[in-house]
Image (cartoon, rainbow, N blue to C red):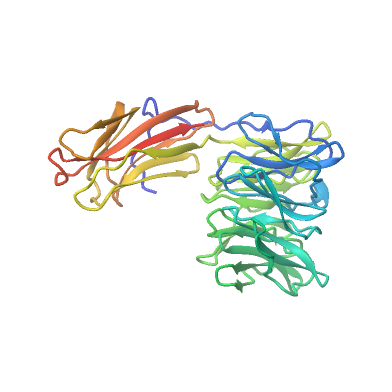
Amino acid sequence: MNLQLVVAFGILTAVEVLAQSAVPLTSGSGIGGRFPVLARDADVVAYVAMVGASRELFAVATDGTPAVQLTSGVDVRVGHGVLDPSPPLSISDDGNRIAFWNATGVHVLDRQAATDVLVASANLLPMPSIAGDGSRVVYQDVVQGQLEVFVVDSAGAALPVPITTASGPGRRLPHVQGDRVLFQKLVGDHMELFVHDLATSTTSGPLTSGSGGGNRHGRLLPDGSAFVFEAVVGDAQTPMRYAFATGAVTTIAAGTSGSRLAQGDQDGQASYELTGIGPEVWLANPATVQLTSPSRGGHKLPAIDRHGQVVVWQQEVSGAMEVFARRSCWPIVVSHYGSHGTLSIGALQSFARAYRCTQTLGVTTPFSPGSLGAFSFGLPQALPLSGAPGNFLWVSPVAGLFVAANGTGEVAVSFPLSAATFAATLHCQFAVLDAAANSLGVVTSEGFQVQIH
């Protein structure tokens, strides 16, 4: 990413990104584990808690709003409880669909439609994983005494389809992202990782070798370009990363005896657990940062969002496990209104992208690097621009600045996101100089509405 400048909305100056301390999201959750799972692109954490004698599914945001109970009387199953390092829940990237299982089988709960669909009858440690877009679920089920991987439509509209056969002893622990399904299978004396392509119905692997004893707990990155897993290095379970493009395996955190359960974001960061005196949560960024102190109560099961802006985990409090979160910054939501003006060649195209705790807004242009553009923010309006037919001032400017196009023709601004950012809705717009487009020589972009959490 080639960034022109750093501006902070309101005063257009750089500010330090403040890290937030760990905060509890739940209380009074009862016995057993919470098994929190975090949506990649939404402020939604799904977890389980006791309601009377039944374990039920809940959802909570990290902004302090109360948790919401999503099921009643379903008695969610969680495998071997707090000692099981495999998450029994899974959540779609938008936080809307949640996969879980109970005595009747694998379910997909749709929060928006308020439906709970039984998609498969498997109820012996199926460990379901739902795709980022919520369209399908993979899980493991017993076939002739062995656990095999199946895929099924989230709507329950079709029968499950097997992906593996004759897999041998142990768990498969499948994870799905896009068309890729990652799973483990015994090779010699070690569990190794394989990938199945749902688009071509082909399986590749093993992609790892000599991984040692225990499970690999492989997890695909949000964009599916790589996966993280644990392997034995020396006598330590060590978090590793495999890149599909190169086949390269790299160490996420070296010398961390007992570390495991890694989850990676798409910006080179990873959360993982380190087990010493008691389990701890760490973040590799790429330097390692300790997020929690050792505590009892079983696995912490840390989860990370798409850009590593928040990490959630479970932790013992007064004899009960509760859900905690540590947020580095609040994301923003960008929408558009109005329309672009017409260039003399090509067309403007808006974009918004985040990298860790930096947000970039801009427009792509067909112009050469150094071509002049402008950025302004203020109040929304719809005022025709005199001398430039078809162009509008969608923002009544409070302030602005000139911006030169970068090496790929982008006219963009970047600004840091902070855990201390105030909630606000802001409006901004870009413009570029194009002498051949109209008599004024200016073409304006559509308006950007920026909602800061």
Q: Give the residue drawn at x 22%, y 47%.
A: 343
Above-or-below relation of 224 to 202: above
Q: Can residue 233 be seen at all in this image of the molecule?
A: no
Q: Position of residue 9 (x, y in %)?
A: 40, 29
Q: Position of residue 445 (x, y in %)?
A: 29, 40
Above-or-below relation of 226 to 318: below
Q: Quadrant of residue 351?
A: top left
Q: Quadrant of residue 251?
A: bottom right
Q: Quadrant of residue 58?
A: top right
Q: Is residue 380 left or right of residue 243?
A: left
Q: Give the residue drawn at x 29%, y 27%.
A: 397
Above-or-below relation of 145 to 384: below
Given residues 10 and 431, the one toward you in this image is 431
Q: Position of residue 204 (x, y in %)?
A: 60, 72
Q: Is residue 408 left or right of residue 216?
A: left
Q: Position of residue 381 (x, y in %)?
A: 32, 28
Q: Can residue 336 be seen at all in this image of the molecule?
A: yes
Q: Is residue 423 left or right of residue 208?
A: left
Q: Is residue 317 left or right of residue 156?
A: right
Given residues 351 and 52, the one toward you in this image is 52
Query: Residue lying furthest right in this view?
Result: 53
